Amino acid sequence: MASMLGIINLHESEERIRELTLHRSLAAVPFGGRYRLIDFTLSNMVNAGIHNVGVLLSDKYGPLLDHLKNGKEWDLDRRKDGLFLLPPASHHGPSGHTVTGDIPNFLHNLDYINKSRQAYVLISGSNMICNLDYRDVLDYHLAKGADITVVYSETAGLTKSPPYTNVVTDAENRVVDMAVNPRTPKGDKASLNMYIMSKELLVDIVDYCASRGREDFLRDGIIAQLGRLAVYGYPYRGYVGEINSLQNYYKHSMELLNPAVWQELFFKSGLIHTKVKHEAPVRYLDGAVVRNSIIANGCIIEGAVENSILFRGVHVGRGAVVRDSIVMQKSQIGPHVLLQSAILDKDVQVSEGKHLIGDGSYPIVIHKRARL
Amino acid sequence: MPKKECVAMLLAGGQGSRLGILTKKVAKPAVPFGGKYRIIDFTLSNCSNSGIDTVGVLTQYQPMTLNWYIGIGSAWDLDRHLGGVSVLPPYVRQDGGEWYKGTANAIYQNLDFIAQYDPDYVLVLSGDHIYKMDYSQMLQFHKAKQAAATIAVIEVPWEETHRFGIMNTDTENRIVEFQEKPKQAKNNLASMGVYIFNWDSLQHYLEEDETDPKSSNDFGKNVIPAMLAAGEPMYAYPFDGYWKDVGTIDSLWEANMDLLEDNPPLDLNDPDWKIYAPNQSLPPHYIADTAHVRRSLVTEGCAVFGEVEHSVLFLGVHIAPGARVVDSVIMPGARIEENAVVEHAIVGENTVIQAGAHVGCVDGEGWMMIDRNAAGITVVEANIVVPANLRLAKGAIVSVTEWQEFPEERIS
């Protein structure tokens, strides 16, 4: 396989998922019982043989740095290449104006890109939940002789909830149009925000945009160049969950309860790696009644859990009922508590007998470390 | 190399022959335990949690799984530039080489390894036991007593003293007599196989032991008695936590079942004394609508569609709809298919129990039974397939290359 550099671009919209991104970037939002969103993209890259990954940080990156550390869990603690945490431009130098796009972040880290030894580069966001083999995408890119290959899905229903990028292709899958959040999309194809191109082209695009005061990698660097460059679409037909709103977060979390989705996401092209906490196996004690749920290690269960996701180290007390809910790491559910359609952030304590009931389509969110 | 105050030597080369088919392909320390661990994780985690960062692991019998598992020691934070974990198999010298003849000889053959660190103390451990212990406290005790050797001891029931090395002590905990597996014990303080030696004493007595051709080069049988006979100050360090030698099928099964109690005697959830194990990157487990899980331990990667009661499911176990698992230990990657029943059993790694098969039934037959377990625990070897609808007798030890029925009388 030709060598490829991975860049994870964290310049992502958090507007519709503010409840979970108050203190963390979108990439660091906990998902699926023991992961953070970035684990999926990062693991897909590593599983495809990418050994050099740069993460273009945006803001609120404390929790993310703590999560990634030196990249060891992803086998990216390497002498040559490995994991590079690339600081954002806006946090450096006396730039007079407010940065709105991601091109300055690329520009700020152009040295890293230039000096990397790989011929190709894969650029991706962090919020697409899928288990995708990037080697197939690179093979496709080379076979098409494309300048840029954009991964899209026609089946995941991404155009139903903005933000999304609509992709329009011809019969040969050449991209003829792309649009960010158009009022009426043309067809159902939407970009997964994953692009493969040569490293030289990426450098050219960054230079072209930066030298003309253009700051948006997608709009200015790719969409505006569709006439000039051969951009092809790679159709991905597997499961994709785009986490761009609280509703989508809840929806795709609940889809993990479908064993076919669980199987595909966590096993298909490779395993999903994450920070290890060394928690013990789950203890089911008297009173535990668990149905259709995903339970992470370290939990102790003495109550009822239905259609729910419990992260590591959650305790469900005697007589408690947890239904259609997501309970994040180390939260404590007291005896006889009723939780319905609720999302509890990390380390929340709900004391005995409390009832927290959200709506099926609008779950209530309890903030990190809340004491109820 | 810079000096280390204390170097640990972990004996991990034993076969654990009483575990039978469970140690056919792996050494005893590599036998899975407690849902996500292997036996050696407890000793290695104890070292890490006690601040001992230099550990030699002596391997000999079936070391492949251990080598892979230990790696460079990252799981236990033992991937250190100075010290860390070193796997030490027997090796060849200019004048030839030999296998480790006994526990003492294994350490003797690695005196050079220890000498590199110029330690004051050497902690000798066995990779066969399940327990949580702070070795740094034992070292403090050893220093305070100005002992030449300190042996950790635990009270055992009087009727079991014949299985252990028994220490007779005075009121100051000084060891006055040692009885190896006595018929008539004078005390019920059993050696846990955890020793601290002053480095110079250890070196001296190991060298002396090596010159005796009649010695079986064993700590319990030879070195400890020799030190006592020479009048060395030796002390018993009393330990009162959970400690279990999981050397037999029954004790391995029991120790797993101990974890299912309300307040288990061995707390695996203690954030201040975690037991580490290499991570296998498996997702949280899935419990289906059709599943019933009662009084059990379930680990990452499992998918449960059937019924599980009073059992321990290890990493990546699959329990199909209609299957029933009771009072059992299901090791990593095993699959229990539709309507199969597993009772009072240990199922080895990656073994498949096909649809409708019944493991451990009272009226079962002696298919591929190589032995019988007196306590009635059925054991199915790793990496085999138990064909659909087969009935395996309660207490059968099942090992197979090709399925054929064994009449009871052929089993000795």
Image: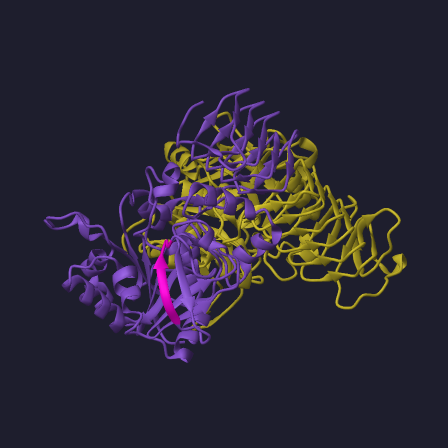
- As for residue B188 lying within the magenta part, the answer is no
Is A171 drawn above or below residue A259 in the view shown? below
> Is residue B85 among what the camera can see?
no
Q: Residue B57 at what x, y percent from top left? A: 47, 55
The image quarter in which residue A151 lies = bottom left
Q: Residue at x 45, y 22 (%)?
A: A372
The image quarter in which residue B411 lies = bottom right
Q: Main secondary structure of the magenta part?
A: strand
Quarter of the rendering occupied by the N terminus of chain A: bottom left
Is B145 drawn above or below residue B71 in the view shown? above
- As for residue A178 lying within the magenta part, the answer is yes
- Which span is picked out in magenta? A175-182
In the figure, what tint was chain A given? purple
- Residue nearest the observer in this picture, B127 or A120: A120
Q: Residue furthest top?
A: A353
Q: Residue B400 at what x, y percent from top left? A: 75, 64
In the figure, what tint was chain B given? yellow
